[in-house]
Amino acid sequence: MTFPPLRRFAIGAVLLFAMLALAVPARADDALTPAQKNAVDQAIHDYLVNHPEVVLESLKAGQQKSDMQAAAQAQQMIAVKRKELLENKDDLVQGNPKGDVTLVEFFDYRCPYCKQIEPSLDALLKEDPKLRIVYKEFPVLGEPSTYATRVAFAARKQNKYADFHRAMMATKGDITDDIVLKVAASVGLNLDKIKTDMGSAEIDTLINANYALAETLNIDGTPALVIGNTMIPGAIDLDTLRKDIATARKGG
């Protein structure tokens, strides 16, 4: 569970108070009188008021430890789920099929940040002949997202999945079912067939499998990227992507 900053601050203060209190001898013959206890409480209060950096440093160290533990756990789960991440035949794959580095993106067609990084992914595909990108449909932003994902999976049967994906990611503003169908028509998809195919139980299975994989990897938003052994939540710039790919090539 992630606590908001103010709550984390309060928790840190309470923990620090508890540690200081525990440092006071607890044996019966060393018990504090009420007046002494009040003096200790006041001293702790005054110290925290005069030295808030102590609490901040403690919180920072705790957050760093938590981040390191989360990164280690993510690496472990990436290794366990590597085949599902990289080798699912139902995913859209672009770039070099035998590339030495695979970038996996969990995305949503309604996600503005996914659309924000799409030009960077396209640039990487053009400049890096050894890169492979796997696009994971992860509709988490409501019914229109799920509708778009269903159309995308149905487009596979007309060999236009990639065309539909690119057109959808280039569509500005929010999307509705009607907009999704207009985009589908614009890339030459047969809409009658799309409407039939998109309701299949097979597509339910594909979407649910991606939800399950994301949950295992502790992914709850888009975009989420996996490059090598590293999980990257949120949109990042092109130069950072290049560095992360270079690190993955070195085994990182």
Image (spheres, rainbow, N blue to C red):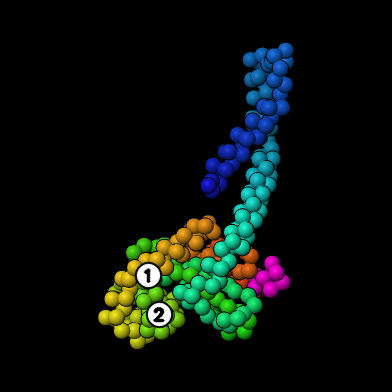
Q: Give how far across and how far down residue 140 sits, in percent.
A: 42, 62
Q: Is residue 54 left or right of residue 208?
A: right
**Along the line of sight, which residue is nearer the eye, 244 or 212?**
212
Residue 215 seen anywhere in this rendered image of the structure: yes
**Along the line of sight, which residue is nearer the eye, 119 or 79?**
79
Q: Secondary structure at mark 1?
A: helix
Q: Quadrant of residue 242?
A: bottom right
Measure the alpha-carbon separation of dots 2 and 1: 11 Å
Task: Please name the residue shown 29% across and 80% down the image.
Answer: 193
Amino acid, disc 2: Arg
Q: Give how far across and how far down residue 119 sits, in percent.
A: 52, 78
Q: Give how far across and how far down residue 151 sits, in percent.
A: 35, 75
Range of the magenta residues? 243-252
Give the labeled residue for mark 2.
156
Q: Is residue 148 left or right of residue 226?
A: left
Task: Please name the residue shown 36% across and 62% down the image.
Answer: 142
Q: Is residue 63 above or below residue 227?
A: above
